[in-house]
Image (spheres, grey):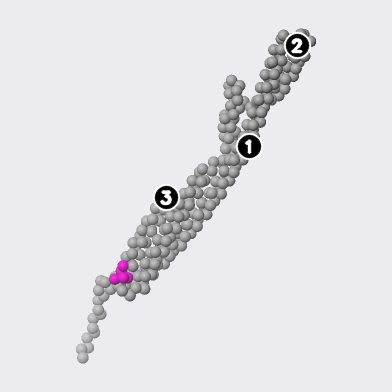
Amino acid sequence: MDGRATPAQVPSPAERAAARRRVLIPVLIALTSVLGAVGTWRTSNASGSAAGAERRAFADTVAAEQQRAAIETVIGSIEFAFARRSALQQSAASLRSDAATAEPEEAARLTALAAAQEAAAAAYVIDADALHPDGSLDLEGKREVEWGLAADLQDLDPGPEMDRAADLRAKSQRLVGLTAFFIAAALFFTLAQVSRNRRVEILYWTGGLAVLAASVVLAMVVEVL
């Protein structure tokens, strides 16, 4: 019997690669699981932020409608006052015209009545913002002034919040798809780990790496967008 020690068999490259895969697969399964959990967390955050933006948009819409109603109340009051003042002024002018051709006693009565109506007309003070330079009504200008003043005090435009909510909803949906990719990568690595056929193991290993790489790239794109 030969007393010399038999040299250890040197692993082939395929065996060394298989050994590395067996070491890396559990690590990659844990990594994809963590990334999937992060994706789920980010999805929940995006969905919650979208709901918050929608609530703010709704509050802005309600505030805007309330402000429009208040402005229309003011506009209605101005229209009534202007119409009443115009009617009194026209009536006073008519009375003075009649007084010019009436008997002295009747003329005095008509003149006094005209003066009373002119005083009543003067009591209706019209906001300068609601008048054109020629004295005619400018209700649209008054609306713009009132709306501008109200908008300076509170947010009355739901548009930005609605746009933000839509963007966050879209991001949430993209994150759901991204999480599914991480789960798929973890499944591929798990199948590679339990596979007894080396070719099938390599196939699942390659598929898992490809899906993981694509998922990481998509994650960066989603976060940038």
Q: Residue at x 49, y 46 (%)?
A: 163
* Relative side of 167 to 21, left or right: right
- Label 3 and label 1: CA atoms lie apart by 40 Å
Answer yes or no: do the residues labelled 3 and 1 have beta carbons within 8 Å? Answer: no
Q: Residue at x 52, y 54 (%)?
A: 48
Of the 4 image quadrants, the one containing the N terminus is bottom left
Is residue 129 in view?
Answer: no
Magenta stretch contains residue 219: no
Report the residue that reaches farthest toward the left. Answer: 2
Q: How many marks on residues?
A: 3
Magenta segment range? 199-203
Asked which quadrant contains residue 182, the reply is bottom left
Residue 217 drawn above or below residue 128: below
- Label 2 and label 1: CA atoms lie apart by 45 Å
- Label 3 and label 2: CA atoms lie apart by 82 Å
Q: Indicate the position of residue 31 as horizontal and vertical percent values.
A: 41, 65
- Give the residue type that dot 1 points to: Ala
**Nearer to the camera, 50 or 117:** 117
Q: Indicate the position of residue 177 as horizontal and vertical percent values.
A: 42, 58
Per the rendering, the mark at residue 225 is: 3
**Nearer to the camera, 159 or 117:** 117
Q: Indicate the position of residue 112 as horizontal and vertical percent values.
A: 76, 15
- Earlier in the chain: of badge 3 and badge 2, it is 2
Looking at the rendered structure, the secondary structure element under dot 3 is loop
Report the residue that reaches farthest toward the bottom. Answer: 1
Q: Residue at x 54, y 41 (%)?
A: 157
Per the rendering, the mark at residue 70 is: 1
